[in-house]
Amino acid sequence: MFVITGAAGFIGSVLSNTLAQNYPDQELIVVDFLQTGDDRWSNLDIADQNGSIYSRIDPQNIIQTLDTHRDDIRCVFHMGANSDTAASEEDAKKWNLDYSKELSMWCASHNVPLIYASSAATYGNGECGYVDNESLDYLEKLKPLNAYGRSKNDFDKWLVSRLKKEQPPQWVGLKFFNVYGPNEWHKGRMASVVLHGFNNIQNSGEIKLFQSHKEGIADGEQKRDFVFVKDVVRAMIWFYEHPSVSGLFNQGTGQARSFLDLARATFAAVGVDEKVSFIPTPEKFRAQYQYFTQADMTKFKTVTQGNFNFTALEDGVKDYVCNYLLPKSQSL
């Protein structure tokens, strides 16, 4: 039995569906908010069709559920979080720090592996690099730019500080960079530029990108490490299947690409001519805006012995657009 928090969300739903396919003999406890009429549950279509879902529970009931099934749980995949970069300090602390502490302590007490979502937002503007160093001294030096990043870094620090006292038999914190792919439709402004760009093309034939407000960086040349959601899910399953490996690990491709590259890949996948325009970055986000991120993947390559390949940006965007976005738009 697997437990997945944030199971109806973006990464959590792709993970749940993949676990249902890869481990058909295992049941899933899927954890997410249970608002009436919440369409996000449709993200779990494959797990539903496979009959893999044992129960759907609200996050506030998770410890009681874990206690009930403690002898059957093989791993807790903790993907649930408030991922809004504009989240308040209070809300980020409640769901990204305190909730995570509670799950970690339960896993440690019951000898259950914990694989959880950290974030590249912990690196802030990158002044300390993008190295997945798990020493407490290094983590203390990081300066995240918002409450979301601070709450993720605070949990990483808390867990590392407890390692000599009490820890799960395996713990893996994954520092996700800019993840894109299917099942992110509900994320609103936090969805990837691929989804926003595709919608722009459908509506107006062009993609709108933010202008650069930094000297020396041209409009559209802001760069991120874009990583396909199917790859990060494969990585999580790899860690589960290698229980002797623990630690903090970056999840990116190791190659920063520009937003213009992403837009061009989207146009190519849709099959229309490129038309890009630029709009000012909202004032309230400019001080927190990252102009460059790139994961150092040395540590991950070492533990996987170089046997894990990430999908090229153009190939991932083509898969996403041609196999998910276009079919959905054509069925409407």
Image: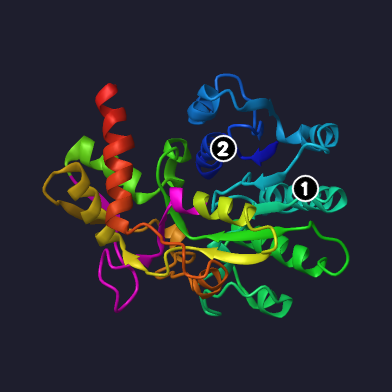
In the depicted view, which residue is nearer to us: 97 or 330?
330
Residue furthest out toward the top:
37
Image location (x, y in percent) of residue 142: 62, 74
Q: Residue at x 32, y 57 (%)?
A: 313
Q: What's under tag 2, amino acid-wise?
A: Ser
Alpha carbon of mark 1 to alpha carbon of mark 2: how far? 18 Å
In the depicted view, which residue is nearer to us: 100 or 209?
100
Q: The C terminus is located in which quarter?
A: top left
Image location (x, y in percent) of residue 22: 54, 39
Image location (x, y in percent) of residue 41: 54, 27
Q: Is residue 207 magenta?
A: yes
Relative to 185, residue 79 above or below: below
Q: Quadrant of residue 173 in the image?
A: bottom right
Q: Secondary structure at mark 1?
A: helix
| Mark 2: few/some/many CA within 10 Å (<14, 14-19, 20+) | many
Q: Quadrant of residue 225 in the image?
A: bottom left
Mark 1 or mark 2, which has the lower sequence index? 2
Residue furthest out toward the left:
273
Q: Residue tagged by mark 1?
A: 103
Give, as a single range, the part of the protein colored magenta. Answer: 206-232
Q: Residue at x 57, y 52 (%)?
A: 236
Q: The N terminus is located in which quarter?
A: top right
